[in-house]
């Protein structure tokens, strides 16, 4: 059974030969090919080669998730970024596109073809698909419309603005979504089997459920419907506390949800499996910080605990609840793969 077949069985809530697994290595892959963080995140060949080097080094990794950074999409609106050697790119917070409440109308739909980084990501997916299509699932990672807006107007300021008058935020979010929809469809055309939407704001750690639905619900639903009509899967990534499974399922109808903490209406991973595991494939939920802190034995127990709580009957993939940032995480990622191959057998 190859990785594509294994993941497909899990997504169909059947038991494959073993639990599918992917340590969520992103920027750390650059160390395998010796390129700078900026080159890795702006040059399609450098990025794809690093992901390929990761797969060649750890061939039992069961899929690609092309997380580059959360600032990729905002560059379509000419947001200046800050690049560094050891951290993902981020907006220049002293030079945000939206500097005041009355500037949300700056954000209009744009043509993704004009965004170098979007085109770079599309090229990365194309390169991976040329080599691995049908063997390793390719999941293209896209920051959702409300999250992208927060990169153009600071999260804190946007949150305050939403209480004063949410309408300009809702319109800007929809305008971003119109761009992201076309971009996501281009990623599918390039070979992505699924789009993984990062919906960080749909969690109790940031805003309440009704506010999220009001601000992003229509926009993200439009994006997901377009991807589904294209014949690809929608997935969710959300590493916030008290993630809103129910509200997002109603809007997005995802095939799978990647998460770090149990949703707001469940007290544990086991309860999450009982409540949602027949409908949604659960991905996670090993704390990424444990990849660099604690003992190997503690890491192993976290991985095994997720398998114990969520793997029965299929519908589960073992992964960190968020990106493994440090290059020191490779030994722990390798242990995660071995646990899936041994402890995670059906």
Image (cartoon, grey):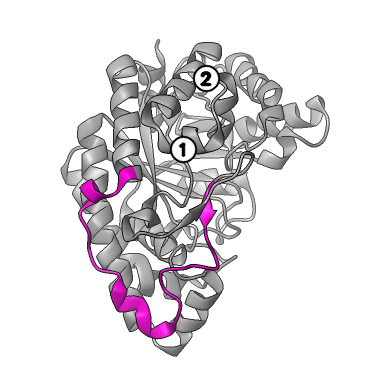
Q: Does the magenta stretch include residue 205?
A: no
Query: Spatial distance from mark 1 to mark 2, Cα to Cα?
Result: 16 Å
Which structural element holds mark 2?
A: helix
Is 181 above or below relative to 108? above
Q: Which of 266 and 168 is in front in this view?
A: 168
Question: What crowding class fits label 1: few (fewer than 14 Cα within 10 Å), some (14-19), or many (20 or more)?
Answer: many
Q: Which of 186 and 240 is in front in this view?
A: 186
Quarter holding residue 166: bottom left
Residue 51 percent across, percent down from the top left:
46, 24
Residue 163 percent across, percent down from the top left:
47, 85
Residue 206 percent across, percent down from the top left:
56, 68
Question: What crowding class fits label 2: few (fewer than 14 Cα within 10 Å), some (14-19), or many (20 or more)?
Answer: many
Which structural element holds mark 1?
A: helix
69 with respect to 308 (left or right): left
Q: Which residue is drawn at 22% across and 63% down?
A: 109
Which residue is at the far bottom?
Answer: 164
Q: Residue 54 carries which label?
A: 2
Quarter holding residue 86: top right
Residue at the disc numbered 1: 41
Marks 1, 2: nearer the viewer? 1
Which residue is at the far left?
Answer: 229
Is 258 above or below relative to 18? below
Q: In which quarter of the image is the N terminus?
A: top left
Which residue is at the far right?
Answer: 295
Q: Which residue is drawn at 16% across and 45% down?
A: 229
Which sits earlier in the primary sequence, circle 1 or circle 2? 1
Q: What stretch is highlighted in magenta?
A: 89-116
Q: Which residue is drawn at 48% across and 60% down?
A: 244
Q: Which of 165 and 120 is in front in this view?
A: 120
């Amino acid at each position: 059974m190859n990785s594509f077949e294994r993941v497909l069985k899990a997504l169909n809530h059947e038991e494959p030969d073993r639990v599918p697994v992917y340590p969520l290595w992103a920027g750390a892959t650059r160390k395998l090919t010796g390129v700078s963080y900026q080159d890795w995140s702006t040059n399609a060949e450098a990025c794809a080669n690093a992901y390929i080097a990761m797969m060649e080094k750890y061939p039992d990794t069961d899929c690609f998730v092309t997380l580059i950074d959360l600032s990729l999409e905002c560059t379509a609106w000419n947001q200046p970024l800050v690049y560094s050697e050891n951290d993902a790119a981020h907006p220049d917070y002293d030079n945000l596109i939206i500097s005041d409440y009355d500037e949300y109308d700056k954000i209009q739909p744009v043509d993704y073809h004009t965004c170098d980084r979007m085109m770079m990501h599309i090229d990365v997916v194309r390169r991976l698909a040329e080599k691995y299509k049908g063997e390793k699932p390719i999941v293209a990672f896209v920051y959702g419309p409300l999250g992208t807006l927060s990169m153009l107007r600071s999260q804190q300021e946007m949150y305050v603005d939403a209480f004063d008058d949410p309408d300009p935020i809702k319109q800007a979010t929809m305008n971003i979504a119109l761009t992201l929809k076309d971009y996501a469809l281009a990623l599918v055309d390039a070979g992505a089997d699924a789009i993984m939407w990062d919906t960080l704001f749909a969690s109790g750690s940031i805003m309440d459920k009704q506010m999220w639905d009001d601000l992003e619900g229509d926009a993200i639903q439009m994006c997901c419907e377009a991807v589904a009509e294209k014949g690809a899967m929608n997935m969710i990534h959300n590493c916030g506390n008290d993630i809103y499974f129910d509200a997002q399922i109603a809007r997005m109808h995802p095939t799978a949800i990647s998460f770090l903490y149990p949703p707001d209406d469940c007290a544990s991973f086991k309860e999450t499996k009982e409540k949602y595991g027949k409908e949604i494939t659960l991905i996670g939920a090993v704390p990424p910080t444990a990849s660099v802190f604690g003992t190997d034995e503690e890491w192993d127990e976290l991985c095994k605990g997720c398998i114990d709580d969520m793997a029965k009957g299929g519908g589960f993939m073992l992964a960190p609840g968020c990106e493994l940032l440090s290059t020191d995480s490779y030994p722990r990622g390798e242990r995660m793969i071995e646990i899936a191959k041994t402890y995670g057998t059906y």
